[in-house]
Image: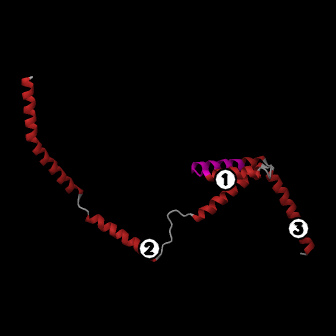
Amino acid sequence: MTLKSFKKLANKVIDQSEKMANQLLQSRIVLYIVFFLAVVYLFGLMLREDIPFTVIFLLIGFLTSFFSKNMIVILLTAILATWLIRVSIGFNRREGMEDKTEETADADKKETTEKKENMTEKPDPSVDLLKVQDEIVEKLKELDPLLTKAEGFIASLKTHA
């Protein structure tokens, strides 16, 4: 294959791909599919309560509308840019992941064994409950003579009144 024939083939492929891209960018079916994807993505952001990314999505779509009047381009740009921003920020924050070295792993093991030991050393709560119950019964026994005196006093007041 010579260089001239390669250039002709490359130009032909580029022309065909440009025609196909133009057809795709002007297709109503593609527009409806992209619109559906944009609405689903936007609702997904709202359901996850990612308000900052929802605002970013809307701002990117609004700004893109100044550069292109093609709604497919606007929606795809908003979806892809918001997704890229969200993914790039997501790489920086890993929930629950820490840089664990052997020292921190050993400290974690010691902490869990201490917790297990502390759990086994705790007294049975039912024993404490029985002690409290016995104290309440003793206090009620001490109140019994006072209650009988109060009842006698109330009875004497009724007879004199």
Q: In this view, does 55 lie to the left or right of 29?
A: left
Task: Residue under label 2, please give it.
Answer: 104
Q: What residue type is labelled 2?
A: Thr
Circles 1 and 3, Cβ within 8 Å, touching? The answer is: no
**Quadrant containing the C terminus in the rendered view:** top left
Find the magenta span and give its range: 33-51
Q: Which amino acid does label 3 sit on?
A: Leu
Residue at the (87%, 61%) spot, across then down: 15
Residue at the (7%, 40%) spot, across then down: 145
Q: Is residue 44 magenta-colored?
A: yes
Looking at the picture, tell me which residue is in the foreground, 119 or 17.
Answer: 119
**Where residue 9 appears, x then y in whole percent?**
88, 67
**Where residue 148 appears, x then y in whole percent?**
8, 36
**Quadrant containing the N terminus in the rendered view:** bottom right
Q: Of marks 1 and 3, which one's residue comes earlier in the chain?
A: 3
Q: How far apart are marks 3 and 2 (CA)?
A: 62 Å
| Badge 3 density bin: few <14, some 14–19, many ≥20, Cα 10 Å | few
